[in-house]
Amino acid sequence: MSVRNAAKRFTSVIAAASLSLALLMQAGPAFADAGFRQWVAGFRATAVQSGVSGALYDQAFRDIRDIDPVVLEKARTQPEFTAPAWDYFDNRVHDQSVAVGQQMAKKWKPWLDKIEARFGVDRYILLAIWSMESNYGEILKRDDIMRNVVRSLATLAYADPKRAKFARTQLIAALKILQTGDIDESHLSGSWAGAMGHTQFIPTSYLHYAVDMDGNGKRDIWNSVPDALATAANLLKKNGWQAGKTWGYEVTLPAGKLPGGSKALSQWQALGVVRANGKPFKNGSDKATLKVPDGRGGPAFLMVKNFSVIKAYNNADKYALAVGLLADEIAGSSGLVQDWKRPFTKLTFEERQELQKRLSQHGLYDGKFDGKIGDGSKSAIMAFQAKAGLTQDGYPSMEVLKWLRQK
């Protein structure tokens, strides 16, 4: 499960975290390593009191002698700003994520049939979560992202005060996962903050929801796609997923102010709120809440119960909406009727990759050509715009790509 929901950003103590790390660094590696090893030795009693075998604890930490500096760097550089709607969705709901999702729907159809029958959760929602969390498992192949979960969580517990409580809880849960035998310590990998497997579950959520779908006796969300998707389905089911129902509807709004709160779909329709594609609402008695994430000029949505259930996976409206929109497109929907208020001409996924390649050729970008426009890509775009005498907005636009093609 994505760690974003369980490890909120605590900006008020970031200075303390940075100072703690700085003091350790100034004291030198030997001091830092000795302090960390002392912490590991001291935490053993806490783990044992929580039900972890002492022998297993010793085995898990056998080759871990120092903190993971990459984990602390990632922890310090988590973004604190709110991205505009188009920026968030363009990086997650695009032609490539839809095309791969449709391929995976075919490849894993027999298992998706079984998972859907057992849990009642829509297969396309599960595929969208898989895309959002690990790019259909591709991030599990990247050594620059995947890290030793025990070491990562011990690092945060020891050297990051703002995440220490979270990390201690997750570390004990991770050790209990090892104790089940579902995975061994050499393969217990995850993100810098401990999110694991194809569907990125933090250890406590794994213990609560993990499923052995393929029947091999192990709940292996790292290597078994059926286990990972079934585990995600189990989470949604246990949090109230309503089988056979959607997450929400794109709608068009009448002029004038609308009341807030939750109302039946039929009541919204009586107020002039209708589906953007012209089709009728299903289950008119279902309660729904109106959301306009990009303001009145952008797309509007009526969200029903399953939208809030998706938020049990990650408690953010944008996340749940991206899952819903991506799921609909994987299932064959043509996408939004009213697009986001994007201040430039949108690029396709392949064009975004081309943009990155051309920026690299100019010596401005040294990241991966993955079509995802993060801080590195934006900085490179702004550098090019400065050289070309353009407005330095960092937008991955067709206008910028055309300039690059001319150079």
Image: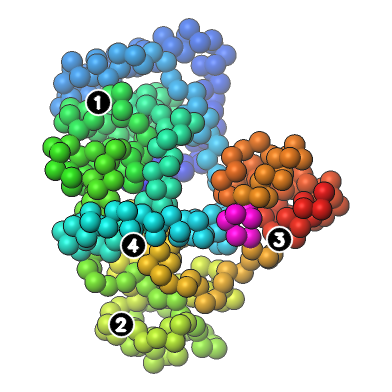
Q: Secondary structure at mark 3?
A: helix
Left or right of 277 in this view: 122:
left
Q: Magenta stretch?
A: 347-352
How dense is the environment of label 2, judged by Cα within 10 Å: few (below 14), some, or many (20 and up)?
few
Q: Amino acid at mark 2?
A: Lys
Left or right of 174 in this view: 200:
right
Q: Main secondary structure of the magenta part?
A: helix
Would you say the residues marked 3 and 1 are in contact, meaning their CB atoms lie under 8 Å apart?
Answer: no
How dense is the environment of label 4, judged by Cα within 10 Å: few (below 14), some, or many (20 and up)?
many
Mark 4 = which residue?
124
Residue for point 37% across, 46% down: 2
Mark 2 and mark 3: Cα distance apart in space: 39 Å
Q: Amino acid at mark 4?
A: Tyr
Mark 1 = which residue?
184
Residue 132, horizontal then vertical, whole percent: 42, 52
| Mark 1 or mark 4: whose residue is earlier in sequence | 4
Residue 75 visible to an observer of this rendering: yes
Mark 1 and mark 2: Cα distance apart in space: 47 Å
Q: Secondary structure at mark 4?
A: helix
Say if 3 sits above or below 129 in the image: above
Tag shown at residue 282:
2
Q: Secondary structure at mark 1?
A: loop
Residue for point 23% across, 56% down: 110
Tell whether position 310 is magenta.
no
Mark 3 = which residue?
398
Mark 1 and mark 4: Cα distance apart in space: 31 Å
Tell whether position 349 is magenta.
yes
| Mark 2 or mark 3: whose residue is earlier in sequence | 2
Residue 291, horizontal then vertical, whole percent: 45, 72
| Residue that sits furthest to the top in the current view | 30
